[in-house]
Amino acid sequence: MEYLNLSKEKTSNFMLSRIGLGSMRMGDVSEGINTIHTALDGGVNFLNTADFYGNGQSEMLIKEALKTRKREDVFISVKFGAMQGVDGRMYGMDARPEAVENYLRYTLSRLGTDYVDLYQPARINPHIPVEDTIGAISDLATKGYVKNIGISEVNGEILRRANAVHPISLVEVRYSLADRHIEDDLLPTARELGVGIVAFGVLLSGLIGGSSQEEKLKSIGQRISPEALATMKANLARTDALKQIAVEKGATLAQLAIA
């Protein structure tokens, strides 16, 4: 496992694993705990969750899994504020500065810890200045409840504004061989500011290098616009050309996509 040092004056001196473990769809408790333990034993120390994953169940699962581990050895990243329906869709974003501390207090209780390593809004509410939201998190960082501040699914301009309020450590964003939109704007800005990228959806929910593509595309299509789905299908078709490269490298297409 490769590790990155997050100490750029704005973060704690933590060696973060390049690969993190997301915990959005961990349903069964024993299986989820076993998954987390397997990841930790394999060198992964980066756990990514959100207060709306399973309506808080994900955070409580992490709490149980870490009872036999040292808290300081694990980096826990938490997203907050998504107004999610029972169908799993995101219907709004509560990024009000006056709500941030309340969200965090419940998260700390569910995790059974007195701090989170990184705290970030799941999305930015266009009706609330990003400066206000990040400023509220910065106040909690000053009190020691938050070690690092992140941001998710933003463009370069929003990242720059957020970073001007408080140094941003990581930006979480969709990025894959079939979706490379961040290369035009966000990625150059992040590099300029020294902000790390946390890529999610790298395998497009198993579409890249996986099977049952039609069923998975149908499921994804329920969550994104028709235009975005069409672009995804076109880009996905192009990944077939990479299969020969994967064979030459002695790797699977999924491994090549992650690399």
Image (spheres, rainbow, N blue to C red):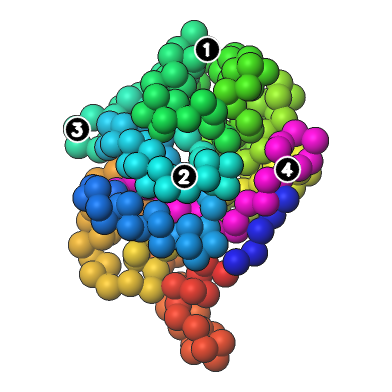
Of badges 1 and 4, the one in the foreground is: 4
Identified by mark 3, the residue type is Val
Say whether disc 3 or disc 4 marks the residue closer to the N-terminus: 4
In this picture, which residue range is highlighted in magenta? 6-25
Identified by mark 1, the residue type is Pro
Say whether disc 3 or disc 2 marks the residue closer to the N-terminus: 2
Of badges 2 and 1, the one in the foreground is: 2
Residue bearing mark 2: 48
Q: Which mark is residue 97?
A: 1
Q: Position of residue 136 (x, y in %)?
A: 58, 15
Mark 3 secondary-structure assignment = loop
Q: Residue furthest bottom?
A: 248
Say whether disc 2 or disc 4 marks the residue closer to the N-terminus: 4
Question: What residue do we see at 53% from left, 50% from top?
Answer: 46
Visible residue check, residue 132: yes
Q: Residues within 10 Å of mark 2 (few under 14, many from 20)?
A: many
